[in-house]
Image: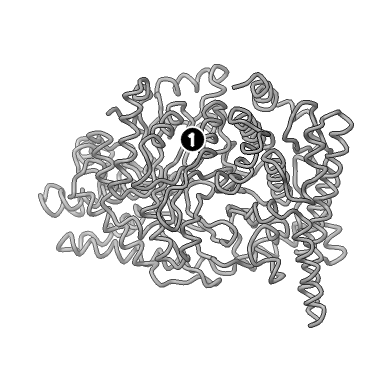
């Protein structure tokens, strides 16, 4: 890391000096009353809000930075008054905050052409619609032009500020962009920073970065060929760019600090199956390794042809405790997406959403986390029928029926969706400008993703019932129900039997692993052929997001020996108290299912003790472990280098561990900034040795 980058890192990340320039927080409804008074529609409101935010932002340029823009307005205003919003809520399904979020914009569609190209396209479309008298479409296109005007004006104010403080690099960038396409990697990265900033200013969130090593490659290559940059200078520039993702992230919506969706994807197969990991991909990993920051979060697309060296480099990142990279297997994901109706080009261009879900850039308005099904809840809801079942197979069918009922209810609950318009996001998505239709109304792909939580606990519970109730007759049916109702009070010996001496997923034991496979197949079967109101399908997945906490909180004692309220495993992982033989047995257990059927996303998450990363030999061993899981048919993997003693000490002495990073579920955060419930769950997860 150069002295220059170290100064920037200290200024923006350690000391957070940029926060000193923030304005006083505003009333979040500051604009809504006026919009209501003039009876403005939601599309017009969205365009005017961005215009207001950019006009009221105070441009701040620091003298020696090359990539500028910080946020000075800490609160983005709402579009609606409280009575208006309550009325909308009463009539619609609201997903999260009701904003367009967690999709991958086509940044290059504006970067590569500049605003001139987009403006000319819009003007031509206005003329076309004026002939046919399409007033609604003309009005929407006017909104898009207003957004372009506002961004250009904002950029010009930044140029003027840069001139005043004597920052030639920033002034030169903004003298060209966004009106003209960039000529250099620096200008392209500054253009991205501008667009990304404006998305947040539009109250869109979880704005993923996508395949930056692909769409920025041309600028990097041209700079190298022309001699404007060498590799080291390009690395320094990328590191400054990465720091920019950490400037305003404390103002972004999320469950916790760090849950902001700033994920990028490296590598991946092309249409011919060739791996596209390139020199810029490697530079991005080098930048992340040197900076050791929680943003941006790195995902690597791999396949059977990916060389071990890529896995080794990723393992060095895991060693640093970053909680990433996360690996996704093209050999499973691409065919899965094609089976779900994505064309081959789009499937091969997939990226990873804020956490782990698979989405496609520019053309996807998929809502990949709209709901979650609890496998364990399906088992628990079936237990009252247990005394009536003569065989395990009869009880198993009860669970299958419950999964289908729950899946139907979840699909039904998604109807009547409302999202605020986003003309800014629409400028970056294919088809929106051409059709004068906001992205909130949908895109080429409009699929919904359902998470699946508590799989290992559900499979372990069914295995315990099969073994001890039906096969060995060691526990009576009603006896089990009574013991669970008592939360195991007075039955410690039996709880120990169920908790530790019953078959568990993660030990390469078909007795229980095939039950887990069957649960996933039923989940896929329950959603097969179902369509949402936007014409999209429902995609099942193995991720949990925050539901692993929510679902466990309301679930009573279960037949796997879990007490009422005890936690579920995060994502696609063994239960918290499974005594697994080791990491190899885990990857064997969790690669047996047909994961292409449940490919909404959800990584096998494994905690490895940090002593496993201390030598080049052990690094190679862990890299081979990751590659083996992918070769076995695993869909996604995320490793953590952890030390239980360190985390316990960090809870007691947070001031000593400000930079301790951990993976929470689909995102990384600073351990000492997490709520205690997240800290405790991470501490409870297994540390494994190889």
Vertical arrangement, residue 588 with respect to residue 11, above or below: below
Quarter of the figure with residue 608: top left
Report the residue that reaches farthest toward the bottom: 132
Report the residue that reaches farthest toward the left: 472
Of residues 91 and 276, the one nearer the viewer is: 276
Of residues 327 and 212, the one nearer the viewer is: 212
Residue 478: x and y in percent read: 21, 54
Quarter of the figure with residue 417: bottom right
Vertical arrangement, residue 391 with respect to residue 261, above or below: below
The mark tally for this picture is 1
Residue 570: x and y in percent read: 40, 42
Of residues 529 and 393, the one nearer the viewer is: 529
SS label for mark 1: helix
Residue 297: x and y in percent read: 53, 39
Of residues 86 and 576, the one nearer the viewer is: 576
Vertical arrangement, residue 14 with respect to residue 360, above or below: above
Judged left or right of residue 42, residue 415 is left
Residue 257 appears in the rendering: yes
What sort of colour scheme is used for the picture?
Answer: one colour
Residue drawn at the location 65% of the way across and 35% of the way down: 241
Assign the C terminus to one quadrant of the image: top left
Judged left or right of residue 364, residue 334 is left
Judged left or right of residue 234, residue 348 is left
Residue 329: x and y in percent read: 39, 49
User: What is the crowding at mark 1: few (fewer than 14 residues within 10 Å), some, or many (at least 20)?
Assistant: some
Vertical arrangement, residue 626 with respect to residue 614, above or below: below
Assign the N terminus to one quadrant of the image: top right
Residue 568 appears in the rendering: no
User: Where is mark 1, residue-wise?
Assistant: 678
Residue drawn at the location 56% of the way across and 56% of the way down: 361
Report the residue that reaches farthest toward the front: 226
Residue drawn at the location 25% of the way across and 35% of the way down: 579
């Amino acid at each position: 890391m150069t002295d220059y980058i170290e100064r920037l890192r200290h200024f923006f990340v350690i000391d957070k000096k940029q926060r000193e320039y923030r304005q006083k927080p505003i009333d979040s409804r500051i604009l809504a009353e006026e919009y209501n008074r003039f009876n403005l529609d939601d599309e017009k409101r969205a365009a005017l809000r961005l215009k207001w935010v950019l006009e009221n932002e105070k441009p701040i340029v620091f003298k020696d930075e090359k990539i500028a823009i910080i946020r000075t307005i800490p609160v983005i205003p709402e579009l609606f008054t409280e009575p208006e919003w309550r009325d909308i809520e009463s009539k619609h399904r609201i997903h999260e905050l009701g904003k367009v979020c967690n999709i991958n914009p086509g940044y290059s569609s504006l970067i590569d052409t500049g605003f001139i190209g987009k403006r000319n396209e819009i003007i031509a479309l206005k003329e076309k619609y004026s002939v046919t008298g399409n007033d609604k479409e003309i009005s929407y296109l006017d909104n898009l032009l207003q957004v372009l005007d506002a961004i250009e004006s904002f950029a010009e104010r930044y140029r003027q500020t840069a001139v005043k403080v004597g920052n030639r690099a920033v002034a030169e960038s903004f003298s060209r962009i966004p009106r003209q396409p960039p000529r250099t990697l620096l200008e392209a990265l500054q253009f991205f920073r501008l667009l990304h900033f404006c998305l947040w200013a539009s109250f869109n969130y979880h704005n993923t970065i996508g395949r930056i090593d692909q769409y920025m490659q041309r600028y990097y290559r041209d700079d190298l060929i022309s001699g404007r940059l060498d590799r080291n200078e390009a690395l320094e520039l990328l590191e400054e760019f990465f720091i920019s993702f950490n400037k305003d992230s404390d103002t972004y919506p999320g469950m916790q600090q760090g849950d902001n969706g700033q994920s990028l994807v490296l590598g991946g197969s092309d249409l011919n199956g060739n791996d596209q990991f390139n020199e810029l991909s490697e530079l991005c990993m080098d930048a992340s390794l040197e900076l050791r920051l929680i943003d941006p979060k790195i995902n690597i697309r791999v396949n059977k042809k990916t060389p071990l060296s890529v896995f080794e480099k990723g393992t060095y990142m895991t060693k640093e405790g970053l909680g990433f990279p996360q690996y996704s297997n093209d050999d499973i994901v691409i065919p899965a997406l094609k089976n779900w109706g994505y064309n081959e080009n789009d499937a091969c261009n997939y990226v990873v959403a804020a956490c782990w879900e698979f989405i496609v850039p520019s053309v996807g308005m998929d809502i990949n986390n709209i709901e979650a099904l609890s496998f364990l809840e399906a088992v628990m809801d079936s237990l009252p029928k247990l005394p009536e079942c003569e065989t395990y197979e009869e009880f198993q069918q009860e669970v299958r029926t419950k999964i289908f009922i729950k899946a139907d209810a979840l699909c039904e609950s998604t109807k009547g969706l409302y999202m605020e318009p986003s003309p800014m996001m629409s400028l970056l998505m294919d088809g929106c400008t051409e059709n004068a239709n906001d992205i909130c109304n949908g895109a080429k792909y409009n699929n919904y993703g359902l998470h699946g939580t508590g799989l290992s606990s559900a499979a372990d519970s069914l295995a315990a019932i099969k073994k001890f109730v039906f096969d060995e007759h060691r526990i009576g049916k009603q006896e089990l129900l009574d013991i669970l109702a008592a939360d195991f009070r007075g039955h410690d010996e039996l709880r120990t039997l169920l908790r530790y001496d019953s078959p568990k997923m993660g030990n390469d034991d078909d007795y229980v692993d095939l039950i887990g496979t069957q649960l996933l197949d039923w989940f896929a079967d329950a959603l097969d052929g179902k369509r949402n109101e936007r014409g999209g399908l429902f995609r099942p997945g193995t991720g949990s997001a925050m539901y692993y906490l929510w679902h466990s909180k309301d679930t009573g004692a279960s037949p796997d020996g879990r007490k009422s309220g005890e936690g579920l495993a995060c994502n696609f992982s063994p239960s918290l108290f499974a005594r697994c033989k080791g990491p190899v047995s885990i990857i064997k257990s969790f690669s047996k299912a047909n994961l292409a059927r449940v490919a909404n996303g959800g990584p096998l998450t494994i905690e490895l003790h940090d002593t496993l990363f201390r030598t080049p030999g052990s690094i190679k061993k862990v890299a081979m472990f990751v590659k083996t899981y992918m070769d076995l048919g695993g869909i996604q993997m995320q490793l953590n280098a952890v030390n239980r003693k360190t985390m316990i000490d960090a809870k007691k002495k947070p001031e000593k561990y400000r930079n301790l990073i951990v993976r929470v579920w689909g995102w990384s955060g600073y351990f000492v900034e997490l709520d205690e419930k997240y800290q405790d769950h991470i501490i409870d997860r297994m540390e494994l040795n190889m």
